[in-house]
Amino acid sequence: MNYLPWIAVDGSCLVDGNGCEVTLAGVGLGGWMNMENFITGHPSTESLHRQALRRTLGEEGYTSFFDRFLTSFFGDADAAYLASLGLNAVRVPFNYRHFEDDAAPFVLKETGFRLLDRVIGCCADAGLYTILDLHAVPGCQNQHWHSDNPTHQALFWQHRHFQDRVVHLWEAIADRYRGNPAVAGYNPVNEPADPSGEVIGPFYQRLERAIRSVDPRHVLFLDGNRYATDFTAFGEPLPNTVYATHDYALPGIAADGVYPGRVREELFDRSTLQRSFARRTEYMRRTGTPIWIGEFGPIYTGDQRRDEQRYQLLRDQLAIYRASAANWSLWTYKDLGLQGLVYQPAGSPYLTRIAPVLEAKRRLGTDSWGGSDQGIRDICDPIERLFDREFPDYQPYPWGRQAWVSLLVRDILLGQPLVERFARCFEEVSPQEAAELAECFSFDRCVRRRPVAHLLREHLHQG
């Protein structure tokens, strides 16, 4: 195992035990311990997807698939590849359900810790730090599918019970890893969205005290409110704490995005990216704390001209981060081809099996990340006109009424029924066949997005 020195906050920088500045440059391990629909192909949420597969595959087939998936998705070869690019960190998202069942709150499961132990070890052996990221909490911390939320309400902020469970889980995680310097720190809540803005600040203070009582040494990485973009609820920064923002640029995620160029009547070029970065990191620069871009990165389309534009967008963002000595974590490492550094090739057995549902998802626009609603504008247009007419002042948190309609229609109304159709793709699949399908996510079965790999190597070797 490579020796990795302890990381700590020193003013606006991260430093090692010798006081030498460390810049974390990494990727997020989305889709592994927290599954997302665009990453692994299922519609809607992880929990609904798992429930449906259990009904279709049976307990033995379900266990066979997920046991193999959780070992194949990330291993030594993946860690070695990331290190070969010059990266030094992996942000590891996980769902609380790996550690606790809703039917037995506060009773923690060893299986979740063993999964984290393995990936931390794989990364450490390759010289990579890990940042542990609780991506889905009991009650759901935001309004969208990636917090495993089947509704449009973030109930975590309304119920002390859910908050108590998260504090209890983080006390256990801190106790488990308090002596491990290969863990750079803890990212306790991904993309929180507290509509009131009144709960998040006191909760973070409570959580910080609880973790520090167990583990006074590890860095905390605290996401801003409103999906890691709003820091108005925070006062003085907490000690040994990094405040994290997410920095997705519209030209890289909009279906009609061009760069440089106009997207939805707004001109986007490098100066636009710079202004957005400055706005999102104002709190960190004002308080003199380190900057960490916990997520960013474009969506790739398969169109060579458009993807070249998105590579340039990524190159410009990285240059902006370098100029401000910002730490960063690119989203995401592995998927079915939308954003991943590596991804399954066309014609893989897994992609072939779920192809009918992938086509239905594209047609119905059920993936709000990387999808398009063009095929259902005949549904959305009249609803949006109705809202414009009847509720012109209605601007629901977090993104307003058009995004609200999209969430309710695409992610929930259409996405959830499609889960059963996805599960039917696995009918009559034996446990052995289920394991072989899961193996399609292993590193040696995937292809590399070479232009991004080259871009990252070039950028990191300049440093």
Image (tube, rainbow, N blue to C red):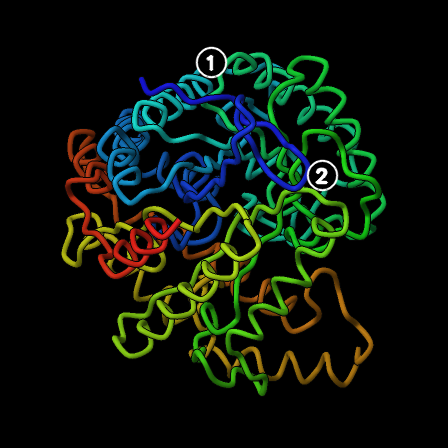
Left of 199 or right of it: where is 37?
left
Query: What residue is pinned by disc 2?
Result: 156
> At 34% from the left edge and 60% from the top edge, which residue is drawn?
338
Q: Based on the displayed image, in which of its 4 quarters is residue 308 positioned?
A: bottom left
* Residue 345 coordinates in the image, percent (x, y): 18, 55
Q: Amino acid at mark 2?
A: Phe
* Residue 365 coordinates in the image, percent (x, y): 44, 69
Asked if disc 2 and disc 1 are in contact, CB closer than 8 Å, the reply is no
Query: What residue is pinned by disc 1?
Result: 110
Circle 2 sits in a helix, a strand or a loop, which is it? helix
Disc 2 from disc 1: Cα separation: 24 Å
> At 28% from the left edge and 28% from the top edge, which residue is drawn?
71
* Residue 425 coordinates in the image, percent (x, y): 26, 50
Front-most of 244 and 270? Answer: 270
> At 21% from the left edge and 48% from the top edge, which residue is drawn?
350
Front-most of 17 and 364? Answer: 17
Disc 1: CA contacts within 10 A as few (<14), some (14-19) or many (>=20): few
Circle 1 sits in a helix, a strand or a loop, which is it? helix
Left of 432 or right of it: where is 234?
right
Q: Based on the displayed image, in which of its 4 quarters is residue 272 positioned?
A: bottom right
Pointer 2 or 1: first along the chain: 1
